[in-house]
Image: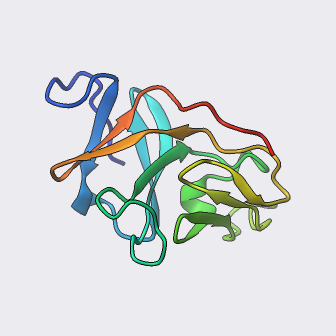
């Protein structure tokens, strides 16, 4: 699991380096650690509406807001920037809730609370994730 280096001095202030772009396969949700906090990093395919083509990486909280035992890296399936809880690895995890990984917004329930999102930046080949979250919304 890539771990962010909050003490790195060559990146933006308030961000931690979590790895290189090549460390994270396209259309996969990976587990990262930023400043001791486990999170999910989605690498979206930028061609079919998958967000910013120069930096198609989006960091969110690690667990689903509907069934908090469900880790998005285990249950999540990406299509563009929409993450769907589809894979059943624990009871109740394949409930079908959909989230926009850019905003954290719930696109389809049963989840009603948005995901916490973290600003992500790409500098050259490196991915940097904010240590603090962006304010989230509730549907």
Left or right relative to 127: residue 65: right
Q: How many marks?
A: 0
Q: Position of residue 70 (x, y in %)?
A: 68, 53
Residue at horizontal 38%, vertical 60%?
A: 52
Residue at horizontal 61%, vertical 63%?
A: 83
Colour convention of the picture? rainbow
In the rendered view, would you say 79 is above or below 95? below
Q: Quadrant of residue 57?
A: bottom left
In the rendered view, would you say 131 is above or below 28? above
Q: Quadrant of residue 33?
A: top left
Q: Position of residue 135 (x, y in %)?
A: 61, 30
Q: Position of residue 23 (x, y in %)?
A: 26, 59
Q: Residue furthest bottom?
A: 48
Q: Quadrant of residue 116?
A: top right
Q: Residue furthest right?
A: 110
Left or right relative to 119: residue 124: left
Residue at horizontal 15%, vertical 50%?
A: 124
State the residue in front, 27 or 134: 134
State the residue in front, 92 or 58: 58
Q: Position of residue 115 (x, y in %)?
A: 65, 44
Left or right relative to 50: residue 17: left
């Amino acid at each position: 699991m890539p771990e962010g280096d909050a003490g790195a001095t060559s990146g933006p202030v308030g961000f931690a380096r979590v790895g290189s772009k090549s460390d994270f396969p396209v259309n996969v949700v990976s587990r990262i650690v930023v400043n001791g906090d486990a999170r999910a990093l989605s690498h979206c395919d930028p061609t079919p509406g998958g967000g910013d083509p120069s930096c198609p990486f989006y960091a969110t909280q690690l667990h689903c807001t509907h069934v908090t035992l469900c880790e998005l890296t285990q249950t999540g399936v990406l299509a563009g920037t929409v993450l769907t809880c589809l894979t059943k690895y624990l009871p109740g995890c394949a409930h079908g809730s959909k989230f926009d990984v850019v905003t954290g917004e719930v696109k389809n329930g049963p989840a009603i609370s948005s995901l916490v999102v973290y600003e992500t930046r790409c500098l050259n080949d490196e991915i940097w994730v904010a240590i603090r979250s962006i304010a989230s919304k509730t549907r």
